[in-house]
Amino acid sequence: MAPLFYPSFQALDLADVIFEELAKRVPGYVGRLGAAWYWRLPGGVLVTFHLDYTVTEERWDVIRAQASTPRVGLFSTADFPFAAYATSPTSPPYIHDLQGLAEWANRLYFQMGYLINEAAQWLQMLQAAAIAPQVSQPSDFPILSALERELAEYALARLDGQFNLTELYRAFGGRISRRRLSRLAAEWEAMGLLTPRPRRVTYALRALLEEEG
């Protein structure tokens, strides 16, 4: 649900830091438009984030998110309350927004990195969900060749999920060129099947392996 009140420009500017860091983890970031931040994920998934409050509009203390597709509309929501990432139960962090002047309150007690990690995990789960036929057309994602499946499975089984080009080329160099392997990694990263560097297999690629298996 959209907030009844909207953050000031300064409050939005302070929150930009969170989403700029999140954009480094998950591709598809469109940017901030109006009072919301947007991601466009593979499978036609559009994700919207916005600031909201639980106490008063002078205290922005939660990020709310929702994901939708043209085919099924809204299909997932998530809340990231700042208090859940506070190191002090008596000093929850929030953005104090009073008459257009905004600043962080209790910022030292805010484990922002944990919030960013969990938001990135949620976005990656959405990418995996997009593979489900009821959410998006299978054609939104590639059909993996036998070699591509082996590369992904090797990364999961032997490299702890890391799509390390050096190690993969060492194992599969007789079947794929270094140039083609590098291009494949870039293509998969652009589709959200790998995270940005250092590249790792995402939930979406795991789901694709299971879907085709």
Image (tube, rainbow, N blue to C red):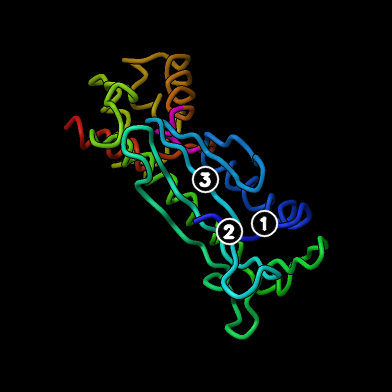
Q: Residue at x 34, y 24 (%)?
A: 140
Residue type highlighted by circle 1: Tyr
Residue type highlighted by circle 3: Thr
Q: How many neighbours does mark 2 have within 10 angstroms: few (below 14), some (14-19), or many (20 or more)?
A: few
Q: Which mark is residue 3?
A: 2
Q: Which residue is disc 3 drawn over? A: 48
Where on the picture, by quarter, is residue 142? top left
User: Is residue 117 shown left or right of residue 24?
Assistant: left
The Cα–Cα distance between marks 1 and 2, rounded to whole angstroms, is: 6 Å
Pair 2/3: label in front: 2
User: Is residue 205 shown left or right of residue 120?
Assistant: left
Q: Is residue 203 magenta?
A: no
Q: Residue at x 69, y 51 (%)?
A: 17
User: Is residue 64 shown left or right of residue 111?
Assistant: left
Q: Position of residue 32 (x, y in %)?
A: 65, 41
Taking depth in this image into account, of 1 and 122 the one nearest to the observer is 1
